[in-house]
Amino acid sequence: MLPKIATPKYDMIVPSTGKSITYRPYVVKEEKILLIALESQSDEAMENAVIDIIKQCVETPINTDTLTTFDIEFMFINLRSKSVGEGIKVAPPCQHCEEVNEDIKVDLDKVIVKGLEEDVDMQVKITDDISVDVAWPTMKNKLTEAEMKTGTDTLINMVARSIGTIYNGVETFSASDSSKKELLEFVESLGSDQFNALLTKVSEAPQLGYDLEFKCKACGEDNKLELKGLSDFFQ
């Protein structure tokens, strides 16, 4: 019988829950899943590959459907760091001369989730009597292609999927007890200012962040930019 390679174990904190989970680095069979997804240049394939790798490498029982987008991205960045090294290379354009600067290093150990302060007020007042608690979208509530036919469809469905609880006076309505159609009808009944207030709160969802600084190899100017979301790290 051939020997089995021992893999180390690590712990990380899930950003949205504060709970600790144990994971192992991904190996060749999982990296193959990622490489195939990258070659396809499909966002959906990449997302599915990331989730599959997390399911295989996280040893603590978790339900990926209940994890937020920023949970998934943060977990994968940690997996990537321990699997292939703390640094990856990106190729950002210069903000001054637009020259593409290749091989700029990003320290994955310094990537954080921004916008996850404990004192964030998740409630939006719609009228004197009606308020809405916004919940960060989970993987289970991600938008389908049909819900993103147009920019307007995307925004409306994104807000509808982000509703956690609706308060109307003394009455409370949980989104989990309401149908998708009911939530959509509620959002479409809002005035422009009311909708924009909810959209602004939804748009403030936490996300991966990394402050990147580099000197342009062409013009010599200093650049400062922020990488946001998983796609920025794997351009």
Image: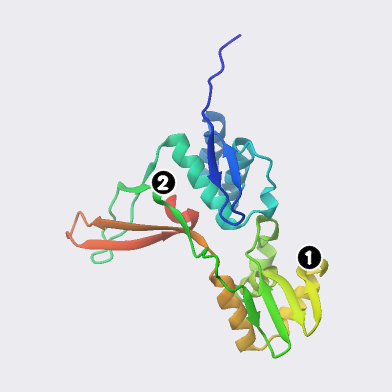
Q: Which residue type does callout 1 highlight?
A: Ser
Q: Please give the name of the residue rendered at 54% of the width and 40% of the height, measured from the top-left corner.
A: 11
- Front-most of residues 27 and 145: 27
Q: Residue 116 carries which label?
A: none
Residue 92 location, x and y as percent? 33, 56
Mark 1 surroundings: few (<14), some (14-19) or many (≥20) residues within 10 A: few
Compared to residue 44, the image places residue 145 above or below, namely below
Q: Where is residue 64 in the image (x, y as percent from the top left)?
A: 67, 49
The picture quadrant where one finds residue 158 is: bottom right
Compared with 193, 105 (above or below) is above
The N terminus, quarter of image? top right
Give whichever of 220, 200 is nearer the camera.
200
Among the 4 quarters of the image, the one containing residue 141: bottom right
Which residue of the protein is positioned furthest toward the top in this rendering? 1
Helix, strand or loop at mark 1 = helix
Residue ID for mark 2: 109
The secondary structure type at the circle numbered 2 is helix
| Residue 40 in sight in this render | no
Q: From what the image shows, is residue 53 above or below residue 125?
A: above
Q: Mark 1 points at which residue?
A: 176
Q: State the residue at coordinates (29%, 49%).
A: 102
Decide if residue 57 is in sight here.
Answer: yes
| Outermost left residue | 220
Question: Sequence-wise, which precedes: disc 2 or disc 1?
Answer: 2
Q: Is residue 100 left or right of residue 165?
A: left
